[in-house]
Amino acid sequence: MIVNIAAYHFTRVDAPGALADRLRSWAEDGALRGTVLVAGEGINLFLAGAAEAIDRFLHALRGDARFADIIVKSSLSEGQPFARLKVKLKQEIIAFRRDDASPLAQRAPAVAPVDLERWLSQGHDDAGRRVVLFDTRNREEVGHGSFAGALTLPIDNFTDLPDALAPHREALADATVVSFCTGGIRCEKAALWMRASGMDNVLQLDGGILGYFEQVGGAHYEGRCFVFDERVALDPALRPLVDAASAPGRPDAEAPFRSDGALPA
């Protein structure tokens, strides 16, 4: 079995090129494939390979004090879902281009998956406010599944989100808004920006959809969660729609990634 990991971590990186070289070396030593993005604000990675190689990579990564507490989400597949290894330098590990959305200074308040599930089951948060789930992903991803009744936007890129959200802001004023995405990175930036722009009623779903699946399962979620590799989408048990072992080959593993070059999460 192949172990698939997804992780991101916001931290100041003063020498992104040097870090990228080390990450590439560690991944190549274990014959890992996937995509790693490095920027001055941190790292964002999707990698797959043998369990022992993944363990060695994570041990080396966590040996760097900046990434000692990085949270990693794991799943299994019968085949390798990536065609090759890519390590890239970027301006942001997920492009949003908003100065007031940097998690380096602070993190938006978060709600744990178990608490969100409880809120959805009881129909309100612990203060009695209605809960609105806000999907920060693009229309292709939403097409594979989302939380029941979530607010979704007809966007193709994460950078389109602020303008697309504008018509909905007034209607969200009396609710507790929980932003969510695949693994947590986009909803973290979105929640920060929303709060900075006057929406102090916004939280982020800690760990995103994949973290919710791991801790809660599929309660209140409809469909699957789109992932950016040959597996296409995962169900709440983290099983793939298409296993990489039987998927048709793709010459470039980055083909399904966003047009702005960022690796979504």
Image (cartoon, helix red, strand yellow):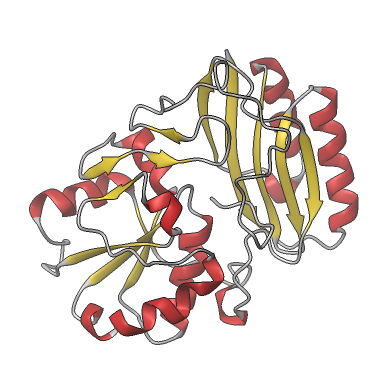
The answer to which quarter of the image holds residue 86 is: top right
Q: Residue at x 36, y 49 (%)?
A: 143
The answer to which quarter of the image holds residue 222 is: top left
Up the image or down, 105 lies above or below 140; here it is below
> Would residue 234 appear left or right of 122 to someone viewing this image?
right
Where in the figure is residue 238, as x and y percent of width and height?
41, 28
Foreground residue, 167 or 247? 247
Where in the figure is residue 186, as x and y percent of width and height?
51, 60
* Residue 181 in view of the camera: no
Q: Residue at x 40, y 41 (%)?
A: 225
Q: Residue at x 84, y 63 (%)?
A: 14
Up the image or down, 104 lies above or below 207; here it is below
Q: Residue at x 58, y 28 (%)?
A: 4
Up the image or down, 106 lies above or below 262; here it is below
Foreground residue, 90 or 18? 90
* Residue 100 in view of the camera: yes
Q: Quadrant of the N terminus?
A: top right
Q: How many marks?
A: 0
Up the image or down, 131 lies above or below 122; here it is below
Where in the figure is residue 231, as x and y percent of width and height?
51, 29
Foreground residue, 136 or 143? 143
Where in the figure is residue 179, as x and y percent of width and height?
37, 63
> Would residue 226 appear left or right of 255 to someone viewing this image?
left
